[in-house]
Image (spheres, grey):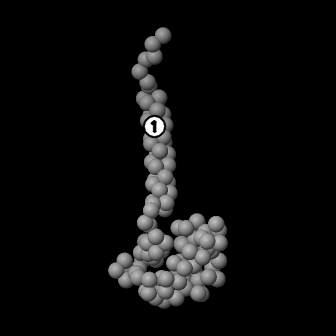
Amino acid sequence: MQAGPLSPKGRQHALGILLLAAILLGVAALLRAKQLAREAVGFSTYDRVRSVLVRRMNMPRSEVTLQSPLDRVDRRELVLALGEEFELNLAEGEADSLVTVEDAVRLIERARAANK
């Protein structure tokens, strides 16, 4: 028995399923790419902290060095963003100890070492 052409409603349903599958595959690919980027060799803690400061805290990239002060940044928000980026549970109280970018890098390195 041969199947005939799909009705307009059947085509619409099939296209919806295909679109959903494409979206799910895209999301999976993005999540995998993010994971690979985190595991990439040479992507240091400083690079990732700098990226968070630029992307999430709106600091100009040219102004972010290890010695850069964090006086113009909401430090509690930064601690939350860093915890999310590094998949660490950082206490908001740590925000008070962050004076420079280097302090943020050291906080992450200490937390990572403690989680090993």
Q: Position of residue 14 (x, y in %)?
A: 46, 32
Give the residue displayed 49% in from the left and 60% down from the top: 39
100 w.r.t. 78: above or below: below
Residue on which disc 1 sits: 18
**Mark 1: amino acid:** Leu
User: Who is closer to the viewer here, 95 or 40?
Assistant: 40
Q: Is residue 56 visible?
A: no
Label total for image: 1
Disc 1 packing (10 Å; few <14; some 14–19; many ≥20): few
Q: Is residue 102 visible?
A: yes
User: Who is closer to the viewer here, 34 or 77?
Assistant: 34
Q: Position of residue 41 (x, y in %)?
A: 44, 62
User: Who is closer to the viewer here, 10 or 18?
Assistant: 18
94 w.r.t. 113: above or below: below
Q: Position of residue 1 (x, y in %)?
A: 48, 10
Residue at the extreme top: 1
109 w.r.t. 100: above or below: above
Give the residue displayed 55% in from the left and 67% down from the top: 86
Q: Position of residue 32 (x, y in %)?
A: 49, 52
Give the residue displayed 44% in from the left and 87% down from the top: 67
Picture quarter with the C terminus:
bottom right
Give the residue displayed 53% in from the left and 83% down from the top: 103
Q: 60 left or right of 105?
A: left
Residue at the extreme left: 62
User: Who is closer to the viewer here, 85 or 65?
Assistant: 65
32 w.r.t. 105: above or below: above
Quadrant of the rendered image containing residue 94: bottom right
Could you say whether the residue bearing mark 1 is in a helix, strand or loop? helix
